[in-house]
Image (cartoon, rainbow, N blue to C red):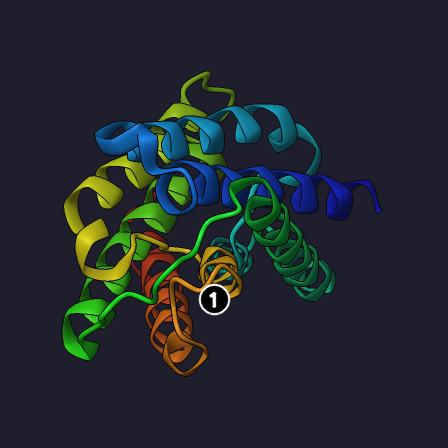
Amino acid sequence: MKKYIVELIGTFFLVLTVGMTAVYAPGAGAMAPFAIGMVLAVMIFAGGPISGGHFNPAVTVGVWLRGACPAKDVGPYIAAQAIGAVIAALVAGYLGKGETAAMSLSVGPVLLAEFLFTFALVYVVLHTATSKVSEGNSYFGLAIGGTVMVGAYSVGSISGGAFNPAVAIGLVVMGVVGVVDIWMYLVACFLGGVAAALVYKKVADQ
């Protein structure tokens, strides 16, 4: 149960930061991706020793395929992450008290952007947080948070820069992504996570 609580808390603060810096109170401007990447990094450093610090269903699936997450934890992790995302989106809406408008999304660019940077994210997670070669390193949180930051700067204007089905759920609750569009994020993010796990198993010294 401790692991699931940690996953809920970490995902909560990730989605809350997305909401408060990029949706309801976008005063952070160009610094929003930095804030989002940093909150992910610090939550990974805090929760990593307990749950692995996934905070992302695509990461959970990738880590499971890599063999570093028990199958019995996959469903509860994803449920905890989704619950954390919904609660965070509701809190952000209460704190922000602002109107939001759904993004205008193009299927092809969204699918490609979300797939590529979810792949990059899960690939980095597997290499820095699960590999024997990098075991015990002190930089894994920054590497993972930095990947999200780079992705948000690169393609945030195209897809919103979720790279995470739980964040996508939060964006739906906040009204940034339409309910009918969430399939793009689910498909692209999960495929990106699966692809990253398969590539990792081919290239890494596990």
Using a 10 Å C-alpha cutoff, classify the residue at mark 1 as few (fewer than 14 neighbours), some (14 to 19) or many (20 or more).
some
**Is residue 120 shown left or right of residue 69?**
left
Residue type at mark 1: give it.
Val
Residue that lies at the very extreme toward the bottom in this rendered image? 180
Question: In the rendered image, which quarter is residue 160 located in?
Answer: bottom left
Q: Nearer the viewer, residue 136 or 31?
A: 31
Task: Answer above or below: position of 106 versus 131.
Answer: below
**Is residue 92 shown left or right of residue 164?**
right
Mark yes or no: residue 134 visible: no
Question: In the rendered image, which quarter is residue 10 located in?
Answer: top right
Secondary structure of the residue carrying numbered label 1: helix
Task: Answer above or below: position of 149 versus 91.
Answer: above
Q: Residue at x 40, y 74 (%)?
A: 178
Q: Residue at x 18, y 59 (%)?
A: 158
Q: Nearer the viewer, residue 122 or 15?
A: 15
Residue 5, percent from left and from top: 76, 43
Residue 124, percent from left and from top: 34, 41
Q: Which residue is mark 1?
A: 172
Residue 31, percent from left and from top: 27, 27
Mark yes or no: residue 15 visible: yes
Q: Nearer the viewer, residue 54 or 24?
A: 24
Looking at the rendered image, the quarter that the C terminus falls into is: top left
Q: Residue at x 57, y 52 (%)?
A: 89
Q: How many marks?
A: 1
Residue that lies at the very extreme toward the right in this rendered image? 1
